[in-house]
Amino acid sequence: MEKVVCVTGASGFIASWVVKLLLERGYTVRASVRDPENVVKTAHLMALPKAQERLKLFKADLLEEGSFDAAVDGCEAVFHTASPFFFSTDDPQKDLIEPAVKGTQNVLNACVKAKSIKRVVLTSSTAAVIYTPSRKPDDVVDESFFSDPVFCQEKKLWYQLSKTEAELEAWKLAKAHGLDLVTINPAMVIGPLLQPTLNTSSEAVLKLMNGSASTYMNLAMGWVHVKDVAAAHILAYEVAEASGRYICTESIIHYKRIVDMLRTHFPNAPLPLKCSDESSPPAPEYKVCTDKVKSLGLVYTPINDALKDCVESLIEQKMLKL
């Protein structure tokens, strides 16, 4: 029997990998994009193995009520990945928060109408997990942690606020309508790009590699391979017992160690030698429990390999010249 699923925001970095792995596993995929006629954004999807037989593009916009209904109707699962990801904006409400929250409402309302949906898998983020003043340095962060919207607003962490508000709205709607919802909360996602445009997390690596960053940040953060994140989404649907939230991060690593790993692989790259904040002690590599997602059967790719894959892909896509 044909297994039909929907992936929203399908031309994005994570979503393209979700589509690829779904096609490999025999699914028929309905992929929502803002403009199916935009070949620049969709050609890489239609070039995937089995895409001609089992991938169909649908036009949908996060802010347009009802625009996901056609793509979702008749599907057994929806992977909702569509959400803006960038950090700099003059209008966070319009550019980040509204599309994230309204988009989640529109997609989940389409799922309620469809009646055929067995489970919704939402791409959230560790941005919706770790930003809370109650988190102490010695805490081991797990899925029970939730970012505090008031704290995010006070600190002007607009992307973090958008992901937190969107996930809270998703849980509220799922409870109200009896939807089976699972969220994947990845950290900084890197690895090979399938899409032809540069995404925010890959850009962070590119800036270290191409000499445009004279220093690296005094910051420790989570990192994870894009293929692992895509696989986690599919496991969250296929494993019947899956429930709740799943932090998806291979490890928490300070930027200095990231730069050192990159230098080992690419010794001639103009990588930064100094920290942007030499006067302060290094930001601590806080602890995160990564076990829950492993219970679904996920095996993490070492972040050292993810970095190498990311850079080699940037070179192949002609975004980086060494």
Image: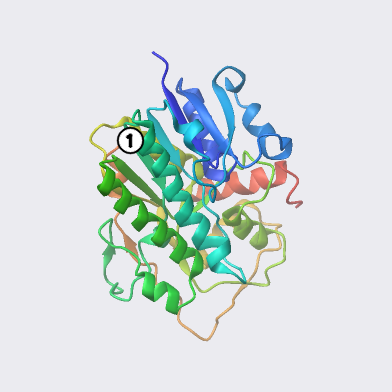
* Residue 242 horizontal/vertical position (percent): 26, 38
The quadrant in which residue 284 appears is: bottom left
- Local crowd at mark 1 within 10 Å, few (<14), some, or many (≥20)? many
Residue shown at the point (51%, 25%) measured from the top left? 23
Up the image or down, 277 lies above or below 49; here it is below
Which residue is identified by label 1?
119
Asked whether residue 55 appears in the rendered view, the answer is: yes
Could you tell me how many numbered marks the image carries?
1
Up the image or down, 51 lies above or below 36; here it is above
Extreme residue in the top direction = 1
Up the image or down, 317 lies above or below 52; here it is below
Asked whether residue 299 appears in the rendered view, the answer is: no
* Residue 274 horizontal/vertical position (percent): 61, 75
Secondary structure type for disc 1: strand
Asked if residue 318 lies left or right of residue 222, the reply is right
Residue shown at the point (57%, 40%) measured from the top left? 60
